[in-house]
Image: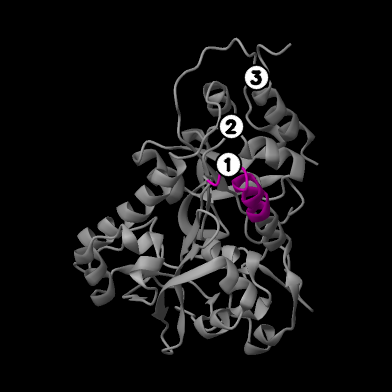
């Protein structure tokens, strides 16, 4: 379906060995999501909430889109040429149910009646399977040098957990925030000596994170803390670093980190700052810590950099791709048409 995109990946990769190195360019691949409730879900079009791309740019990182239905081979080509992966929050369902008109690419957060949410889970959705495959492919890369990070935020945090869990019921719909941003504290549950994230966290900031409503939560599903503790496959891969509680006082997973890979996730959104609560400065500290944590991990990635300029020119996200979508109400997004991406001539110099 994406023959042109796959060919473009290979074209960008097949640069001459005589090309001069342009120096190291930090490149993070950001996974796209299907447009919510699209009338044409089969079209190879994806979107990324603009806050993620714009924030990476502020940290002097180039964002490259990773199409959410990319083939195994093309994904490997792309992964070999980037330094890390960001899996964002968003409306896409990670689960497939026994009955739904919108199993693959719907926003399952819409309240269509309680009965809808009693459906039987029968597996991962198409998007959930892609994230699982992505995580496994990156894990295989890490078997060689162990330096390829993945950071999952909100939906991304859930997806990382599901990718390695034995039981899909680890993802539970028990944290509905009524479609409003909520600021809440977290509770650290990992021993500091066991947690790579906590080991670098200044004690003053850690105390503030536990005692302040400074973590922006907006989600309808989460990884259940109790279910996670009892899932042997999940616990083999992940350390639960911190938890939080929803409006029903149910405890869920707030931060995870892999025991075997440089993978980590936060259920709270570090891509946005909620104003008006007198915690803006603390939110920015938390944001900076986790994005700098990703960047520091990505800087350890060992790969050739001579092709970076060409890859960025070919696949880098540009301002003219920023727009709004009627079915997505969170703000600006970058829309990428992978069938014709990018519009300019991208194989120049390879004829």
Question: Magenta segment, which residues?
Answer: 134-146
Q: Going 37% across and 36% down the picture, which residue do you hit? A: 60
- The residue that appears at 52% across and 39% down in the rendered structure is 83
Frontmost of labels 3 and 2 is: 2
Q: Main secondary structure of the magenta part?
A: helix
Q: Which mark is residue 65?
A: 1
Q: Nearer the viewer, mark 3 or mark 1?
A: 1
Q: Position of residue 174 (x, y in %)?
A: 53, 84
Q: Position of residue 215 (x, y in %)?
A: 33, 68
Mark 1: few/some/many CA within 10 Å (<14, 14-19, 20+): many
State which quadrant residue 185 falls in.
Answer: bottom left
Instruction: Name the residue carrying label 3.
Output: 345
Q: Secondary structure at mark 3?
A: loop
Q: Looking at the image, which is closer to me, 311 or 166?
A: 166
Q: Is residue 333 above or below residue 209?
A: above
Instruction: Determine whether, in the image, residue 106 is placed left or right of residue 7.
Output: left
Crowd around label 3: few <14 · some 14–19 · many ≥20 (10 Å): few
Q: CA distance from mark 2 to mark 1?
A: 7 Å
Q: How far apart are labels 3 and 1 at the CA level? A: 18 Å
The tag earlier along the polypeptide, 3 or 2, is 2
Tag 1 secondary structure: strand
Residue 14 visible somewhere in the drawing: yes
Q: How many marks?
A: 3
Q: Quadrant of residue 279?
A: bottom left
* Residue receiving disc 2: 315
Q: Is residue 112 magenta?
A: no
């Amino acid at each position: 379906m994406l023959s042109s995109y796959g060919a473009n990946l290979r074209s960008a990769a097949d640069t001459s060995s005589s090309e001069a190195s342009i120096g190291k360019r930090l490149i993070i691949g950001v996974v796209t999501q299907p447009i919510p409730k699209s009338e044409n879900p089969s079209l190879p079009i994806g979107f990324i909430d603009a806050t993620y791309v714009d924030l990476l740019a502020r940290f002097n990182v180039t964002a490259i889109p990773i199409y959410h239905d990319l083939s195994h081979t093309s994904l490997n080509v792309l992964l070999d040429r980037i330094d890390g992966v960001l899996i964002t929050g968003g409306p896409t369902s990670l689960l497939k149910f026994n009955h739904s008109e919108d199993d693959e690419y719907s926003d399952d957060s819409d309240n269509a009646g309680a009965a809808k949410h009693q459906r039987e889970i029968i597996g991962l959705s198409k998007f959930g399977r892609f994230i699982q495959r992505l995580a496994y492919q990156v894990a295989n890369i890490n078997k060689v040098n162990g330096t390829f990070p993945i950071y999952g935020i909100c939906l991304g945090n859930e997806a990382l957990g599901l990718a390695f869990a034995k039981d899909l019921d680890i993802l539970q719909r028990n944290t509905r925030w009524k479609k409003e941003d909520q600021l809440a504290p977290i509770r650290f549950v990992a021993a500091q000596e066991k947690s790579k994230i906590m080991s670098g966290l200044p004690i003053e900031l850690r105390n503030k994170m536990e005692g302040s409503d400074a973590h922006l939560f907006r989600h309808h599903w989460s990884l259940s803390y109790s279910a996670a503790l009892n899932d042997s496959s999940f616990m083999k891969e992940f350390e639960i670093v911190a938890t939080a509680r929803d409006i029903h006082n149910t405890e869920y997973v707030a931060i995870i980190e892999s025991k075997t890979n440089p993978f980590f996730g936060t259920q709270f959104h570090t891509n946005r700052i909620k104003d008006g609560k007198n915690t803006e400065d603390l939110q920015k500290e938390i944001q900076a810590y986790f994005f700098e944590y990703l960047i520091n991990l990505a800087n350890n990635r060992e790969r050739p950099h001579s092709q970076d300029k060409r890859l960025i020119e070919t696949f880098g996200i540009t301002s003219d791709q920023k727009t709004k979508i009627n079915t997505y109400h969170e703000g600006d997004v970058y829309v990428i048409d992978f069938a014709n991406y990018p519009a300019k001539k991208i194989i120049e110099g390879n004829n």
